[in-house]
DNA sequence: CCTACCGATCGGTAGG
DNA sequence: CCTACCGATCGGTAGG
């Protein structure tokens, strides 16, 4: 297990730097410096700069899918299912704020065929939310809205939350709950 | 007026390239190529790469403020005011999709003192939405939510819409209306 | 994990 | 607006 320790350190530092400065503006020398080694030494653990980005993006994709899978397969009704899926999505972001920021903003620097794979994965993920919303709309529980637009709006609304997790402040459970409520029940009182 | 024509062309192309590849991954040679000139020739019209970014970011900030100012000063109630402000925000994005993408994602590449100015401006803008929500909460029209969180959620939820405006498809007025409704009234039917 | 180094490319300038 | 060019830095390799 110790074999991967250094590679994990590299990835953790890379997540932080890619998130702070962006993938393109982070040099391998920046990364090496932050680890206290020479840039050339990084290549004993990784094969390229892009490989790090690939691992961050696709392992986050895995985390997001794993989090909502049991909810999709549950017998919950549309409203409860949408709430649970949104909470699961927010929890993944909260647990991996740096990696989430990279996942959300730096994927476009992936080369092919990874870029196409990534876009496909992302669409499948959005589709899961869309399907839940469609079901709720069909049953008359949700408004008669375009499910694709509602899904993108909902996911986009969650995607600022990694900012609160920088280090100082943690978005609390109540705050995450509030976001979910706003999206599902709206801002106006009932 | 013709004097500024070339500089405007540079900025327009830069908006598109910065949006597609990111600021750091766009070189001055990329920009020059897309205009059919040499990289050195750009410097007859601009003084640095960052100057272009500054102009995009701050002129978009102006557009956003100008759009919601009359709404803030109107005598509308909290619900109508929040709806109008959200619609105005969405309209600015729809009218400037490339520049909006740059405004939203590339501002962190600004150097000081522009970076600090930008962050301050952005906070003031968010505060306007927060104030409207606070007013609605106080009057019991809105849920008893944290206004700062609601404001960020609302704005974040609108910030994917520039993607639809790439060139092929336009987010229709009804779609923008739907997004606003989801946020203010929620997904669930009343 | 380091020293030494590679070709390519970067933002930008001089001078016309 | 171009040619010619600058020093700095880029991702990455060879060889130990």
Image (tube, coloured by chain):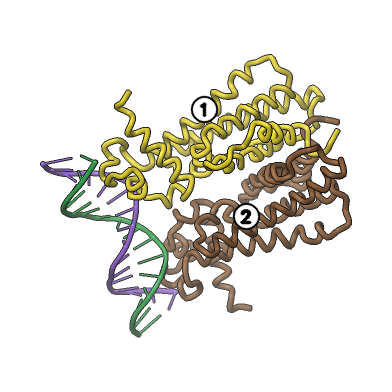
Chain colours: A yellow, B brown, C green, D purple
Instruction: Quarter of the image for the N terminus of chain B: give it.
Output: bottom right
Q: Is residue B140 left or right of residue D3?
A: right
Locate residue A10: give its quadrant: top left
Q: Residue furthest top?
A: A75
Say above or below: B189 vs A159.
Answer: above
Provide the residue designation for mark 2. B100
Measuring from the top left, give residue A79's x and y in whole percent: 74, 24
Q: Camera-side residue: A91 or D1?
A: A91
Locate residue B41: give its quadrant: bottom left
**Residue at the (76%, 40%) spot, across then down:** B183
Q: Secondary structure at mark 1?
A: helix
Q: Secondary structure at mark 2?
A: helix
Q: Is residue B50 left or right of residue B130?
A: left
Mark 2 chain: B
Q: Is residue A113 left or right of residue B129?
A: left
Q: Are marks 1 and 2 in contact (CB under 8 Å)?
A: no
Question: Count of labels shown?
Answer: 2
Say above or below: A80 vs A162.
Answer: above
**Residue at the (83%, 45%) spot, across then down:** B136
Instruction: Quarter of the image for the C terminus of chain B: give it.
Output: top right
Locate residue B40: give its quadrant: bottom left
Say above or below: B139 vs A87.
Answer: below
Provide the residue designation for mark 1. A63
Q: Is residue A7 left or right of residue A169?
A: left
Q: What crowding class fits label 2: few (fewer than 14 Cα within 10 Å), some (14-19), or many (20 or more)?
A: many
């Amino acid at each position: 297990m110790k074999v991967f320790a250094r590679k994990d350190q590299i990835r953790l530092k890379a997540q932080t730097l890619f998130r702070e400065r962006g993938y393109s503006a982070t040099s391998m020398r920046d990364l090496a410096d932050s680890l206290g080694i020479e840039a050339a030494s990084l290549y004993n653990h990784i094969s390229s700069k892009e490989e790090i980005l690939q691992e961050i993006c696709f392992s986050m994709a895995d985390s997001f899918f794993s989090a909502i899978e049991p909810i999709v397969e549950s017998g919950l009704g549309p409203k409860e299912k949408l709430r649970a899926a949104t909470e699961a999505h927010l929890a993944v972001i909260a647990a991996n704020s740096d990696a989430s920021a990279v996942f959300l903003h730096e994927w476009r620097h992936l080369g092919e065929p990874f870029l196409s794979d990534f876009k496909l994965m992302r669409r499948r993920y959005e589709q899961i939310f869309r399907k839940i919303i469609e079901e709720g709309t069909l049953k008359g529980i949700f408004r008669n809205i375009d499910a694709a637009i509602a899904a993108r709006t909902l996911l986009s609304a969650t995607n600022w939350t990694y900012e609160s997790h920088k280090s100082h402040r943690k978005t609390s459970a109540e705050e995450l709950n509030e976001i979910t409520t706003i999206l599902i029940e709206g801002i106006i009182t009932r």
